[in-house]
Image: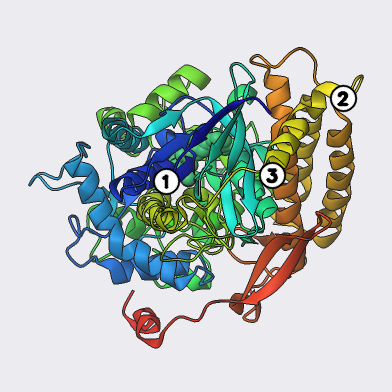
Amino acid sequence: MDFERHAYDVVVVGAGGAGLRAAIAAHEAGARTAVVCKSLLGKAHTVMAEGGIAAAMGNAWPEDGWRVHFRDTMRGGKMLNHWRMAQLHAQEAPDRVRELEDWGALFDRTPDGLISQRDFGGHRFARLAHVGDRTGLELIRTLQQRTVALGVDVFMECTVTRLLTDDEGVTGAFGYWRESGRFVAWEAPSVVLATGGIGKAYKVTSNSWEYTGDGHSLALQAGAGLVNMEFVQFHPTGMVWPPSVRGILVTESVRGDGGVLRNSAGNRFMFDYIPDYFRKETAETEDEADRWYDDKKNNRRPPELLPRDEVARAINSEVKAGRGSPHGGVFLDIASRRPAEYVRRRLPSMYHQFKELADVDITAEAMEVGPTCHYVMGGVEVDPDTAAAGVPGLFAAGEVAGGMHGSNRLGGNSLSDLLVFGRRAGAAAAEHAAKRSGLVALAEEALTDAARAALAPFEREGGENPYTVQQDLQQTMHDLVGIIRTAPEMEQALTRIAALRERVAALSVEGHRQYNPGWHLALDLPHLLVVSECIARAALEREESRGGHTRDDFPAADPEWGRTNLVCSRAADGAVTVARRPLPQMPPELAEVFEEAP
Ligand code: FAD
């Protein structure tokens, strides 16, 4: 078939933090490297990150160190995290931040000139390195400049639709240019998936159009497993009003910097929702909580800074009990607690976001907020040290990879995750490619098949439009596989997903291949459906409540499930299967960390 072809050692799919960090590492290891991304370079989700990068640098608290960060991360994930990933992450994050600084990132400073670190939920010490509330922008700017300066090839506005494999593993990838609709293929012995998450499977989300679960689905199709898919993080504070901006994130830094949550009666309701698991380290009274901001040594943390799953469930309960705000959220108040100048300086993006999108001045009035689908803990099952997925030559890093965050991610731990494992994935991908150099070739039949599949929506006539199918899927996931779940609802969701699959197989798109968003969505929909099915199947199987998975019919955490992972795979007939696997065992010297004082 006649279309554009390229040959590289390593192809990185995704140009967020994980993809760019992987590309830099692969290039530095001597691999001919390309990055492919759906949108313009610099437009990934990473750029939207506000709060900061979690790293136990000890700048704000000399007592901080990797062991405390490791402990916080495991406890935040309710001990379901892959211990080795959590260990590597905590140990290596400080070096990754310092390296960014060496490459030109300008972090906020402490009065004595160190990188400033801020408080975030679930972290024992203030440890988020940040740049105001625009940390992701600085991170992506720095990585992007370095990637381009090193001479890594970038394919922008180009979507990968298939991974190509032979009996030995990965041989490359296939995709199309979004603008022209023309096809392109990359021959490469190593492919790194860095495609981010799945937020667009849900109706209310902080994620943008790019998060359609492509990498999760491509990996599954190529034969890799997806672990922990039942765990979806609903960030407690998204905008709820006006409807056009519902779901847009309100950073946790608002609470870290003194903001509190109140219900319609004006009560700081989080004090009513402190779980026993976190009671020892959480303030019991408003006075103690307020003192903590000035004297963190002698006071415990406010309950507003409990891990996200706890806060999201509490907000959900308040709204359900009829104590919500006028537009179905609760109030987040920093106006009555901090001077206007402080709020504008510490939270400039939030100030402008509310002013411009909701006509609310957050220095004078409370915000209305509610849970929004934010992050998927589940993802491609990888080897912790190399980020290698089950298929030789396939690697995954960043949000698309699973295991690191267990059942719930702590804020700030994603930016550090993608730096630590992006680098590891890039280096391992280069090493694998060096061994397979000259041994891979693209099979013509596989290319023809990929092209035929991509063009299928044009071949059908009179079918449904892809947007209505997406809306129905988002409503299904919102209503039936959301924050609180039950078996009958998830069974209903699976029936609906099966019906949606038939509708996708029959839908048609109009027009031609040049910049045709309807066609693009038609190609994204099978990815969204398969990740939604994985979430629903795994969530139905896990009969307990833990982290980002709450079952109304099994409200308690179950110790047996605390030793069990669920892994989704694709059977030969294309069906999604879910298998139970024992959780990797933590070595005794690491288990000792949990005996140490909180
Ligand atoms: P991304 O940065 O999303 O990049 C994905 C890339 O993959 C994009 O380039 C996309 O175009 C590309 N892609 C996807 N599919 C394809 C395909 N089929 N073909 C080609 N390219 C493809 N985390 C923190 O740690 N701290 C924070 O303060 C923080 N704040 C956040 C605020 C917001 C509003 C949001 C949404 C998230 C926040 N997070 C934060 C989470 C964090 O930003 C993300 O988890 C992280 O940036 C994901 O990075 P990534 O490199 O894995 O993916």
Q: Give the residue at x 73% y 40%.
A: 445
Q: Quadrant of the N terminus?
A: top right
Residue 85 location, quadrant: bottom left
Confirm whether residue 353 shows in the render. yes
Instruction: State whether residue 329 appears in this view.
Output: no
- The image shows residue 370, relative to residue 562, as above or below, that is above
Which numbered circle lies on residue 322? 3
* Left/right of residue 361 with respect to residue 158 in the rendered view: left
Residue at disc 3, secondary structure = loop
Q: Toward the viewer: 64 or 265? A: 64
Whole-angstrom CA distance, mark 3 to mark 1, is 42 Å
| 88 over 317 or under it: above or below | below
Quarter of the image holding residue 468? Answer: top right
**Residue 473 at x, y percent in the picture:** 78, 38
Q: Secondary structure at mark 2?
A: loop
Q: Earlier in the sequence, mark 3 or mark 1?
A: 1
Q: Are the residues flagged by discs 3 and 1 in contact, CB closer than 8 Å?
A: no
Ligand 1 under 8 Å from disc 1 Cβ: yes
Dot 3 alpha-carbon crowd within 10 angstroms: few under 14, some 14 to 19, many 20 or more:
few
Say what amino acid the circle numbered 1 marks: Ala
Q: Earlier in the sequence, mark 3 or mark 2?
A: 3
| Relative horizontal placement of residue 314, taking residue 150 as reference (left or right) | right
Give left or right: position of 382 versus 260: right
- Residue identified by numbered label 2: 464
Q: Whole-Å distance between the Cαs marked 3 and 2?
A: 39 Å
Disc 1 marks which residue?
18
Residue in the picture at 40% in, 29% down: 42
Depth check: 226 or 12 in front?
12
Q: Amino acid at mark 2?
A: Glu
